[in-house]
Image (spheres, rainbow, N blue to C red):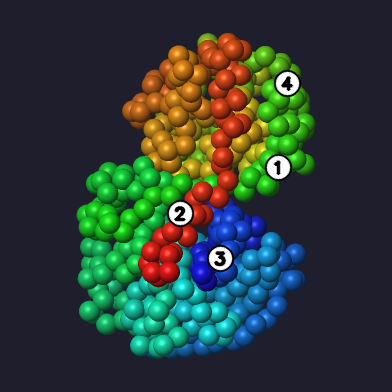
């Protein structure tokens, strides 16, 4: 089985969110299961020099973008045994950042077409083109519109994975002909209120659609979570699967992580040494028995921060807890948490920055990990928290609902604490309930044992993807 991953970002080369983690880890799990898997990315200016210096030039091809041809260099690096190709075009990708430009429609139209044009040049004929999010979503439509007549491409099948349906890639109608080179017979497959919707094109034209958790696969077929595509997704229900993301359990391993204060397997006393180290580093009172609640998150509305800002003062004033927050995002939230840390210097540390080493220290040090998300297609943070024995407190949505199960004090089952309604006081009640169990060692040992015992690797999910590949290629 030969598979090519097409995506806009991948760890460790370029990352803005969880998509990069998936593209960095899932191919390794597929390779371990015997798949010949490769990855193709844009070559952004921001890729670190330690990687660009290792890239080998493979070929140059011309890529049609509407009526004109554009230069496309192809570079390659082998990383952890995975061949990774980079689409080189300074005009489109020699810029700061990844997204947010007025010509993103053209930039990613070029990238999608370049992926298909590059295949003969890199001498790779995949059985499956696995496309991720809107940035790669028109590959199935371009394959159908421009390449099916060519024997080299005729047997290729396509999978689209939706990582976050909120972002769909909507551009003016003129994109269809001027950039994608397709006639009006394709418009109904991408039409979105008179515009062209890249994500819709992928949903319509791919052989199978996946998303990143079973609950999210159900949610996006409703009006609230579907963002205008719920009807289309419902019509494709027989070809829509939800597969939970995993994490790189080799990299994220508290027993070998070089960036935390004290390594441990499941020893809570050793884990507690990480709390003392972090308290000292962040200038909080060094107190081993005070429960530490953490968030590592983007500071945006969808992460449920409006719930937290409503009740955090009450929690910090009345409850004997410490709260550590790490993240960047909307300026209004950054300002709010900085001011809150000024008001509660002995209880709240607001780290408004992006720092991978610090995030690992927080996972290892914290006792509870809060994720009150408005929606969460899968979520990686709760899996990392569980891996490090930090017990999640989450809202029952998307992948949080599939991976965090409420603790039952009668049976001793469950690996976290959950609440259903998007309500600040429900969240606060659930967090206080979690803190109450932290103060009961016989229960806390059970719940942390359940967390440490979970399998958060990609192995099971990788096999589910392989089953889909086999199904659509009939192998």
Asked whether disc 1 touches disc 2, contact meaning CB atoms under 8 Å apart, the reply is no
Point out the tag, 3 or 4, that comes first from the N-terminus: 3
Asked whether residue 401 appears in the rendered view, the answer is yes
Point out the tag, 3 or 2, that comes first from the N-terminus: 3
Q: According to the image, label 4 marks what residue?
A: 269
Rounded to the nearest whole Å, what is the CA distance between mark 3 and mark 4? 41 Å
- SS at badge 1: helix
Q: According to the image, label 3 marks what residue?
A: 35
Rounded to the nearest whole Å, what is the CA distance between mark 2 and mark 4? 37 Å
Asked whether disc 1 touches disc 3, contact meaning CB atoms under 8 Å apart, the reply is no
Q: Quadrant of the C terminus?
A: bottom left
- Residue at 31% across, 59% down: 239
Point out the tag, 2 or 4, that comes first from the N-terminus: 4
Rounded to the nearest whole Å, what is the CA distance between mark 1 and mark 3? 32 Å
Rounded to the nearest whole Å, what is the CA distance between mark 1 and mark 4? 21 Å
Count residues near mark 2 (Cα–Cα under 10 Å), then give few for <14, some for 14-19, many for 20+. Answer: some
Rounded to the nearest whole Å, what is the CA distance between mark 3 and mark 2? 13 Å
Count residues near mark 1 (Cα–Cα under 10 Å), then give few for <14, some for 14-19, many for 20+. Answer: few
- Residue at 44% across, 25% down: 406
């Amino acid at each position: 089985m030969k598979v090519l991953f097409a995506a806009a970002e991948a760890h460790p080369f370029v990352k803005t969110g969880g998509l990069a983690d998936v593209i960095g880890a899932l191919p390794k799990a597929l390779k371990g299961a015997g798949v010949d898997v490769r990855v193709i990315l844009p070559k952004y200016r921001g890729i670190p020099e330690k990687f660009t210096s290792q890239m080998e030039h493979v070929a140059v091809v011309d890529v049609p973008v509407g009526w004109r041809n554009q230069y496309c260099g192809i570079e390659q690096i082998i990383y952890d045994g995975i061949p990774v190709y980079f689409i080189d075009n300074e005009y489109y990708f020699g810029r700061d950042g990844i997204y947010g430009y007025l010509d993103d429609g053209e930039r990613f139209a070029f990238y999608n077409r370049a992926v298909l044009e590059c295949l003969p040049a890199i001498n790779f004929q995949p059985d499956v083109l696995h496309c991720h999010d809107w940035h790669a979503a028109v590959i199935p439509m371009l394959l159908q519109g421009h390449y099916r007549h060519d024997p080299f491409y005729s047997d290729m099948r396509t999978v689209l994975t939706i990582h976050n349906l909120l972002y769909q890639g909507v551009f003016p109608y003129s994109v269809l002909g001027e950039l994608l080179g397709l006639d009006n017979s394709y418009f109904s497959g991408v039409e979105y209120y008179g515009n062209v919707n890249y994500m819709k094109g992928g949903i319509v034209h791919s052989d199978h659609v996946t998303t990143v958790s079973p609950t999210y696969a159900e949610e996006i077929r409703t009006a609230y979570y579907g963002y205008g595509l719920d009807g289309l997704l419902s019509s494709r229900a027989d070809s829509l699967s939800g597969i939970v993301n995993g994490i790189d359990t080799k990299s994220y391993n508290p027993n070998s992580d070089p960036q935390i204060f004290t390594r441990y397997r499941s020893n809570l006393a050793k884990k507690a040494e990480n709390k003392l180290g972090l308290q000292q580093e962040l200038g909080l009172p060094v107190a081993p028995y005070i429960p530490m609640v953490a968030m590592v998150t983007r500071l945006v509305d969808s992460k449920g921060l409006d719930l937290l800002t409503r009740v955090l003062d009450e929690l910090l004033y009345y409850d004997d807890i410490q709260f550590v927050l790490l993240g960047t995002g909307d300026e209004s939230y950054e300002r709010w948490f900085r001011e809150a840390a000024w008001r509660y210097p002995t209880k709240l540390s607001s780290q408004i920055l992006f720092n991978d080493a610090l995030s690992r220290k927080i996972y290892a040090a914290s006792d509870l990990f809060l994720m009150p998300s408005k929606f969460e297609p899968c979520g990686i943070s709760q899996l990392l928290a569980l891996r490090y024995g930090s017990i999640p407190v989450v809202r029952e949505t998307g992948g949080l609902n599939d991976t965090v199960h409420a603790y039952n004090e009668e049976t001793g089952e469950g690996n976290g604490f959950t609440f259903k309604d998007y309500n600040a006081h429900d969240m606060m009640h659930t967090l206080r309930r979690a803190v109450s169990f932290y103060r009961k060692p016989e229960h806390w040992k059970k719940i942390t044992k359940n967390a440490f015992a979970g399998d958060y690797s990609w192995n099971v999910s990788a096999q589910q993807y392989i089953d889909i590949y086999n199904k659509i290629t009939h192998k």
